[in-house]
Every structure is written in C-alpha cells, then in structure tokens.
Image: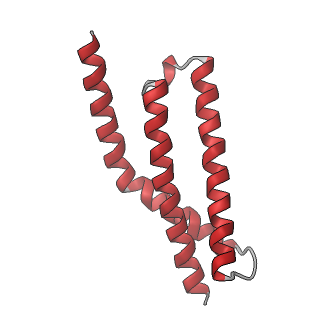
Amino acid sequence: MSIFVFITCACCGIVSGLFYDVLYIARCAVCGIHKQAYTLKDRIFTASCDILYCAVFCAGFIFISVMFGFEGLRLYMLLGCALGAFLYLKSFHVFVAFFVKKVYNGITSKKK
C-alpha cells in the first residue's frame, strides 16, 4: 500500500508541475522574463501566483488523500510529491521555458 501511496503522490507532484507551467506562462506574459526589471506590481503578481500555486497544490493533495483514503500524512508522501514536482521541473518544464522564452523574444523584437 505504501508504494501505491508514494506513486500517487509523485503523480500529484507531476500534475502540480503542469499547473506551475500555466502560472509560469501567465507570469511571463504579464511581467516579462527578465526578473531584474520587475516592478512592485510584477513582484506582487509573482507572489500571488506562488500563493495560488501552493493553495491549489494543497487542495489537490488533500483531495487525492481523501479520494484514495490515505490514512494520514507521512514523510514519504511529501517526498513523493516533491520528487514528482522535481522530475517534472527537470524534464518537461525545460521545454516549456525554452519555448516561452523564444515566443517572448520574438514578440518583443517585433515591437522594436
């Protein structure tokens, strides 16, 4: 049962990575990709995206825990979620970030 819970939590982490990419694209569209040029408005938007990500991740984790009847919060559950998110960020997110940067640079170069 513990292996099923661990794999389910890892999948929850991967799905959270998908939601992170949605917020990443929104943040790049609103604030740009150059963090050095962020204004106060951009920092507030970034912080609100981070808070929204954490809230959705927590809600999703609780939903999955209740749906599958996980008995309690265990360290390996959190490690599974972290591993899933880490694997997602080191694999598919790299492609998303590359294409977002290309699109952003293409759009900003046409404005000049």
Q: Is residue 101 left or right of residue 76?
A: left
Q: Residue at x 47, y 36 (%)?
A: 26
Q: Residue at x 58, y 32 (%)?
A: 46
Examine the image and state in which quarter residue 51 appears.
top right
Residue 17, image x and y in percent? 48, 55
Residue 82, image x and y in percent? 57, 62
Q: Is residue 105 above or below residue 88?
A: above
Residue 81, image x and y in percent? 58, 66
Q: Nearer the viewer, residue 56 or 37?
A: 56
Q: Residue at x 57, y 17 (%)?
A: 39
Q: Is residue 76 left or right of residue 94?
A: right
Q: Is residue 39 above or below residue 99?
A: above
Q: How is the image coloured?
A: secondary structure
Residue 103, image x and y in percent? 28, 31
Q: Residue at x 52, y 65 (%)?
A: 83
Examine the image and state in which quarter residue 62 appears.
bottom right
Q: Is residue 97 left or right of residue 46?
A: left
Q: How many marks?
A: 0
Q: Which quadrant holds the N terminus? A: bottom right
